Image: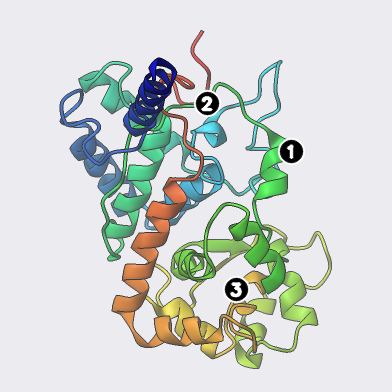
Amino acid sequence: MASASCLSLLVLIAMASAASAQLSSTFYDTSCPNALSTIKSAVTAAVSSEARMGASLVRLHFHDCFGCDGSVLLADTGSFIGEQGAAPNNGSIRGMNVIDNIKTQVEAVCKQTVSCADILAVAARDSVVALGGPTWTVLLGRRDSTTASKTNAETDLPPPSFDLTNLTTAFNNKQLSVTDMVALSGAHTIGQAQCLNFRDRLYNETNIDTTFATSLKANCPRPTGSGDGSLAPLDTTTPNSFDNAYYSNLLSQKGLLHSDQVLFNGGSTDNTVRNFASSAAAFSSAFATAMVNMGNIAPKTGTQGQIRLTCSKVNS
């Protein structure tokens, strides 16, 4: 009996420990009650100054969250090569300066309390709201990693060349459903992409609206290396509004990236795209759910990691 009681006690302790390590919407209510309002005001100002920054901050969270530990913000050091130079990020990831500014403001009201990973999660939500999209309750309590991996970023993050099968596998590997995948892709209702990421689609694919393709070719010539960095909006209809126009574009074969259009190309996700195109409410609800699910991917909690003082480097 003593052995059984001891085992029961251990189980209870383990359950309590797991519960205490869970993310919570009220995590900073006592330790830093002004954290969320500080982040929101800074994000609103940044997006008001440059609408594209909203998309950049959402993308930062996404690229961090195949991990959700602030690792994407770490600059390279002598002991590791970070994620910013990884193929999905190199030359395109941006917004770190805004996060640094927010971190400085948050540190001024609550010293070493709010993690960079949580700032990314909240900033993504506030960016979506600032551009007219839905809100959701962000769960908090993530801690920051003490290392980063270029290799992991290149392995985990789905490139724009992926087909539907590869996309589904990549998201499933992170415990995200097909509906989550289609909803999260809807973040491409804002932001821009570089020519090098959609050139093949313009010149080599047939499931693309001819007029749409022609309008893009002037700034994205066929020869590799010519105009690689030229930008085009991911949503040609309402590029600075967070809405469901992205899905209507797919119905018209106006997806900019290969990985966009494969969501509506005679496959298993066609009906979900149709649903989101016809119902802004359905998309908003699914997107909010998917963002919470994504934010729960392997966060560091409890005593794991640290609360960085500066988001770009590990505490000394």
In terms of depth relative to the viewer, which is nearer, 48 or 42?
A: 42
Near-viewer residue (273 or 48) = 273
The alpha-carbon separation of the residues under discs 2 and 1 comes to: 16 Å
Query: Tag 2's secondary structure?
Result: loop
Query: What's the distance in space between the residues labelled 1 and 3, CA to CA?
Result: 24 Å
SS assignment at label 1: helix
Q: Label 3 vs label 2: CA separation?
A: 31 Å
Which quadrant of the figure contains the N terminus? Answer: top left
Residue type at mark 1 is Thr
In the rendered view, does 250 fall on the left or right side of 276? right
Please indicate, yes or no, whether residue 195 appears anywhere in the rendered image: no
Instruction: Tell me whether circle 2 and circle 1 mark residues in contact (CB < 8 Å).
Output: no
Can you tell which quarter of the image residue 31 is in? top left
Q: Secondary structure at mark 3?
A: helix
Residue 14 occupies quadrant: top left
Residue 136 in the image: above or below residue 273: above
Read off the residue under disc 3.
260
Q: Which residue appears farthest toward the front when viewing the image?
A: 1
Residue at 64 percent across and 85 percent down: it is 267
Sequence-wise, the earlier of marks 3 and 2 is 2
Chain-order first, disc 2 or disc 1: 2
According to the picture, the residue beneath numbered tag 1 turns out to be 151
Three-letter amino acid code of the residue under disc 2: Ser
